[in-house]
Amino acid sequence: MEAPVKEHEKPIVLPDDEYNRTLVHNVHPTSWVNPDPTGRYNIVVIGAGTAGLVTAAIAAGVGAKVALIEKHLMGGDCLNVGCVPSKGIIRASRVWAEVRQVDEFGLHIPPGVKYDFGAAMARMRKLRARLSHTDSVHRFTKLGVDVYIGSCRFSGPDAVVVEGPSGNRTLQFAKAAICTEVASPAMISPIAQAVSDVESSAPRSSVRSRLDQVRSPMAGLRRVGVSRRAGDGVRGWFVGVS
């Protein structure tokens, strides 16, 4: 009988292949030890998505003392579940759609040609892993940013506590930039929980007969387009959009 997998040993991103291991090594390295803060930060940036990364990089570039805090994966939605993955599989879906129309260009595809969605997803993961260095812990450290991996909470008007596997760190700051995606609990209804989110659909290696999407319009519509080009019935649920 195999020993149970400890929580910290479970893969952070599935499937646990070479591409996702490269991704995790860059944007959430398991061996990362949060630095010990030295003095007061000019700015603490909470959230290492697109907004947080740009804020931290610009502030460090003009000489500010910067701390960047990320609980999950640096790069945020854009790198991990949004822009990059969507565009990777959109490219494949466009090719599939064009193949169905090649007869009018004089190219005849024999019957029985199969669409390998698993291969398209593997290509997406390879591209994402290659691009992940740009948003990596190591790159931002070289830019002069102190990177902290872990959840955080405000402990005062000018301090946050970062809770990480290597122990808690208290960061003092002059300014704080909250660059996170905030969702009200009311937005996560039973319907939203019952259907799939972009994040849970990203690791799939096959197209379901019906794919429901819960997300912002941009990411959701991209996935809807992919599914329809693949000949899939699809329905979109867009939550919390004004």
Image (cartoon, helix red, strand yellow):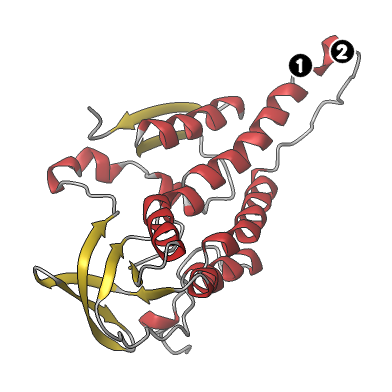
- Left or right, residue 181 beside residue 121: left
In the rendered view, tell whether residue 99 sits above or below residue 211: above
Distance from disc 2 to disc 1, alpha carbons, whole Å, reads 8 Å
Residue 84 pos. (x, y %): 55, 46
Residue 101's label in the rendered image is: 1
Residue that appears at 74% across and 21% down: 100
Image position of 75 with respect to 107: above or below: below
Q: Position of residue 239 (x, y in %)?
A: 26, 34
Q: How many marks?
A: 2
* Residue at 58%, 71% in the rendered image: 21
Relative horizontal placement of residue 213, taking residue 92 as reference (left or right)? left
Q: Residues within 10 Å of mark 1 (few under 14, many from 20)?
A: few
The amino acid type found where label 1 is placed reads: Gln
Q: Are marks 2 and 1 in contact (CB under 8 Å)?
A: yes
Provide residue 67's location: percent of width, then percent of height: 34, 71
* Helix, strand or loop at mark 2: helix
Label 2 crowd bin: few (<14), some (14–19), many (20+), radius 10 Å: few
Q: Quadrant of residue 18?
A: bottom right
The numbered dot on residue 105 is 2
Q: Residue at x 58, y 45 (%)?
A: 206
